[in-house]
Image (cartoon, grey):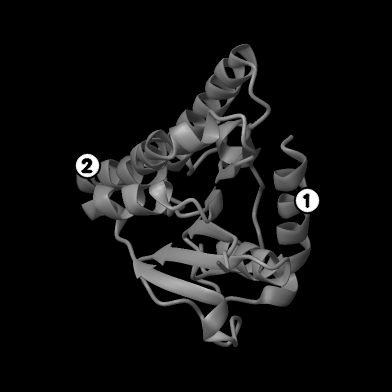
Amino acid sequence: VITMKKVVVVGGSNGIGLSIAHNMIARGYHACILDICQPDKACLSDENTYTYYRSDLLEFDEDLFARLAADPEVEGLMITAGFGRVADFEYLHTAEIEKTIKVNTIAGLKIVRIFYDRIKSQKTFLCGMMGSIAGLVSSPMFSVYAASKAGICRFIESVNVELTQSGVSNRILNVSPGSVAGTRFNGGENNPGATQGLAAQIVEHLFAQD
């Protein structure tokens, strides 16, 4: 029986998520890319190395994540999906506030909960989430985005304490960068050359289970 190592990359169609998927593919993994849009095929040339699943985190598909969590070939999870608008708080609509928290915070916590039996296991399971420097350091024009990422940062820290107390070696990696060039986050374009160095560092820490 031929088995395939798989990694789930939520938000893997663009930016740093795309570069992480590319790096994991180069390491022999099949990337399960979940995103609201198709992956940038200019950056992932061989369609046999990944499977795309449409996923809109505002319309959370719990069954999709449950199927992936139950797949024994899935050996890792990286959550990079997120969005935000750089603007003073007075210019953010209440609907925008709700969407930001739903996508950046609530969806991530739900996904980790669905995969938690895999994470809280004696068997190695790689897991990381994209926080943000905005979730750790206060800054103007990032109020709601910062709040959404602060929730992720505190969540990861708290769950890692629980994992330590339970005696398992798996950890959730908190990746909290500042501004990253080569992504579509703030109206730019994908540039793998600008993101592959950071992606390589993230994957190294993922395997080290820092």
Measuring 61% from the left and 12% from the top, which residue is drawn there?
165
User: Camera-side residue: 111 or 177?
Assistant: 111
Measuring 56% from the left and 41% from the top, which residue is drawn there?
131
Tell me if 56 is positioned left or right of 112 in this view.
left
Residue 108 in percent (x, y) is at: 41, 41
* Amino acid type of the residue that numbered disc 2 sits on in the rendered structure: Thr
**Considering the numbered disc 2 on the image, is that residue within a helix, a strand or a loop?**
helix
User: Camera-side residue: 10 or 151?
Assistant: 10
Residue 177 in percent (x, y) is at: 66, 47
Tell me if 2 is positioned left or right of 149 in this view.
right
Residue 135 image-quadrant placement: top right
User: Camera-side residue: 36 or 33?
Assistant: 33
Write down the residue under mark 1: 204
Tell me if 186 is positioned left or right of 101 in this view.
right
Measuring 43% from the left and 37% from the top, which residue is drawn there?
148
On residue 22, the disc is none
Q: Are marks 2 and 1 in contact (CB under 8 Å)?
A: no
Write down the residue under mark 2: 94
Q: Kindly report the distance in space between the C-alpha atoms of the residues bearing marks 2 and 1.
A: 39 Å
* Residue 22 visible in the picture: yes
Vertical comparison of 121 with 83: above or below = above
Vertical comparison of 45 with 165: above or below = below
Tell me if 168 is positioned left or right of 196 in this view.
left
Residue 127 in percent (x, y) is at: 58, 43
User: Sequence-wise, which precedes: disc 2 or disc 1?
Assistant: 2
Residue 173 image-quadrant placement: top right
User: Camera-side residue: 98 or 141?
Assistant: 98
Which image quadrant: the C terminus? top right
* Amino acid type of the residue that numbered disc 1 sits on in the rendered structure: Glu
